[in-house]
Image (spheres, helix red, strand yellow):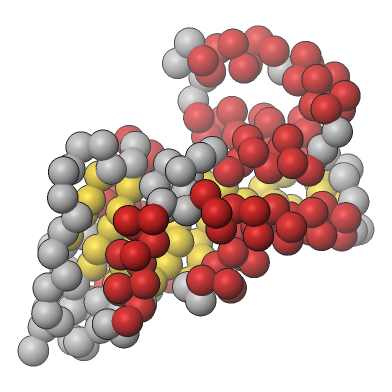
Amino acid sequence: MYATRQTHQNLALFDFDGTLCRQDSFTGFIFYALKKRHIVRQGLKILPQIQAYYRKRYPADQMRQTLFYTMFKDQDATSIQTIANEYAQSLIGTLDSALLIRLKAHQARGDRVALVSASLDLYLKPLCDYLDIDLICTQPQIRQSKLTGHYQTPDCSAEQKSLRVQAAYDLTQFANIYAYGNSHEDEALLALADYPFMLGRDLDLPPLVLKSA
């Protein structure tokens, strides 16, 4: 797939929602960070989009952006970040035990490990700091200490996952590439890997092979 690999280190790439994390952290953050009254009031404004999404007529990446804009526009960034730090701590208990063991196995072997997610850096950054892994994800835009409701980077899903990984790393520098996902939004990420794993499709985790000589 790529030019001859030049080092002995492996790269392991993990999707988050539905893969390393057993729940939808994006939606969970909305309910954790905001008051129920605000969520209901704002949700009514985008009810047609929500209904279309559940009928599979409105793409997931657009739904996330619509939700984020509607729910978080003009929220104080410092206050939301404080809440996000607390939310990150709560996510630790939702991590899939088997994949967390696999992540730590990669680390123990000296592999480079990264979380690649469409979810937000507001809470994924403190979580990745705790796990001591890299992060590639969606970053919200902040201006004058407020969330604008827009993204600073594109929604990190589907092909964007592949593009962001290739922008962050020279893949020829890794002996083997592993990728772990759970949905069609991860297919481009898994296509980068020598050892892909799709949760719900593949029965067994790929073997942790010896690094290239």
Dividing the picture into quadrants, the one containing residue 150 is top right
User: Going by the picture, which residue comes out furthest to the left?
Assistant: 213
Taking 200 as reference, is 62 left or right? right
Q: Is residue 63 visible?
A: yes
Vertical relation: 4 (above or below) 167: below
Taking 157 as reference, is 130 left or right? right
Instruction: Residue 172: give x, y in percent of width and height.
Output: 23, 76
Which residue is located at x 16 percent, y 59 percent?
A: 206
Instruction: Residue 32: give x, y in percent of width and height.
Output: 74, 41
Total numbered circles = 0
Instruction: Residue 93: give x, y in percent of width and height.
Output: 55, 54
Nearer-the-camera pick, 166 or 212:
212
Dividing the picture into quadrants, the one containing residue 29 is top right
Taking 58 as reference, is 171 left or right? left
Which residue is located at x 54 percent, y 38 percent?
A: 24
Q: Quadrant of the C terminus?
A: bottom left
Which residue is located at x 88 percent, y 55 percent?
A: 79
Nearer-the-camera pick, 160 or 30:
30
Which residue is located at x 82 percent, y 60 percent?
A: 82
